[in-house]
């Protein structure tokens, strides 16, 4: 990846705060929810998307007939090429099969003020994730696939294992191990571990360590600790 997003491969673990917002569970056909928050850095799959600067984000979600969902999410970004913001549009279904909670969907990643004449930064990913309860916690796995990744770099696949568990009232520990495979010399492994605190039913905080095995790609791949706050209403 150059200093653009191909080097700036995006978002935290599926179970961490930030990244694509997930629809809230509901039995109503069209139950809307909104979210907004801020973080000391926008980290996507171990890589800073804001040039190690703070992030502000917001989104809206709705359920679709109890099993489907759709939503939109926006955040500032800084790729040092004039790009100002990222917006994600997504839709999917969340069926339950036995003890497994599945999430099958598609995400469109769009960017505002991309450089003229440069390779297209917008791309689409298809996703399949699943999780199951283990004791008081949850374990999960995810696969994301794009047939033409950020910057028109060709096919890319991201796979992840994640887990979370409560450790005290209002506190949850969670982590993930992922591998980003792209159709050029830029594959890497990423991991994160953190603690979340639910202040109440609306506001939550997250303290998380991120790292990759690709520090040679530049400072955006270095280890970092991120503090974030998110409100859902």
Image (cartoon, rainbow, N blue to C red):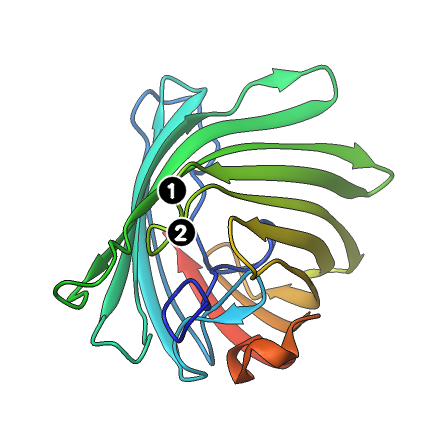
Q: Circle 2: is it few (<14), some (14-19), or many (20+) Cα within 10 Å?
A: some
Closer to the chain start, of discs 2 and 1, is: 1
Q: Circle 1: is it few (<14), some (14-19), or many (20+) Cα within 10 Å?
A: some
In the depicted structure, whether residue 198 falls above or below residue 56: above
Task: Let me know if residue 33 appears in the view.
Answer: no
In the depicted structure, whether residue 174 falls above or below residue 29: below
Label 2's element? loop
- Which residue sits furthest front? 185
Label 1's element? loop
| Horizontal and vertical percent position of residue 4 | 36, 70
Residue 99: quarter of image: top right
Residue positioned 32% across, 71% down in the render: 77
To which residue does mark 1 refer? 148
| Horizontal and vertical percent position of residue 194 | 69, 68
Residue 73 or residue 159, whichever sits in front: 159
User: Is residue 204 found left or right of 123 in the rendered image?
Assistant: right
Query: Do callouts 2 and 1 mark residues in contact (Cβ within 8 Å)?
Result: yes
Task: Let me know if residue 71 appears in the view.
Answer: yes
| Horizontal and vertical percent position of residue 67 | 45, 20
Residue positioned 31% across, 59% down in the render: 58
Residue positioned 33% across, 65% down in the render: 57
Residue 114: quarter of image: bottom left
To which residue does mark 2 refer? 153
User: Is residue 232 found left or right of 160 in the rendered image?
Assistant: left
Q: CA distance from mark 2 to mark 1?
A: 6 Å
Residue positioned 36% across, 17% down in the render: 65
In the depicted structure, whether residue 171 falls above or below residue 228: above
């Amino acid at each position: 990846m150059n200093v653009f997003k191909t080097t700036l491969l995006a978002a935290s673990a599926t179970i961490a705060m930030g990244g694509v917002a997930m629809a809230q569970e509901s039995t109503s056909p069209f139950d809307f929810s909104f979210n907004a928050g801020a973080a000391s850095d926008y980290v996507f799959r171990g890589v800073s998307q804001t040039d190690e600067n703070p992030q502000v984000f917001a989104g809206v979600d709705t359920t679709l007939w109890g099993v489907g969902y759709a939503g939109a999410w926006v955040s500032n970004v800084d790729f040092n090429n004039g790009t100002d913001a990222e917006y994600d549009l997504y839709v999917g279904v969340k069926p339950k099969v036995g003890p497994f909670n599945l999430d099958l969907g598609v995400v469109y990643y769009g960017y505002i003020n991309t450089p003229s004449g440069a390779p297209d930064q917008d791309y689409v990913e298809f996703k399949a994730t699943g999780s199951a309860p283990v004791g008081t916690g949850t374990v999960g796995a995810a696969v994301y696939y794009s047939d033409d990744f950020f910057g028109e770099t060709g096919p890319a696949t991201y796979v992840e294992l994640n887990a979370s568990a409560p450790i005290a009232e209002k506190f949850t520990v969670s982590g993930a191990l992922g591998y980003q495979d792209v159709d050029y010399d830029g594959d890497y492994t990423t991991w994160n571990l953190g603690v979340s605190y639910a202040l109440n039913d609306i506001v939550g905080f997250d303290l998380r360590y991120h790292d990759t095995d690709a520090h040679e790609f530049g400072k955006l791949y270095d280890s970092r600790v991120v503090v974030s706050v998110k409100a859902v209403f």
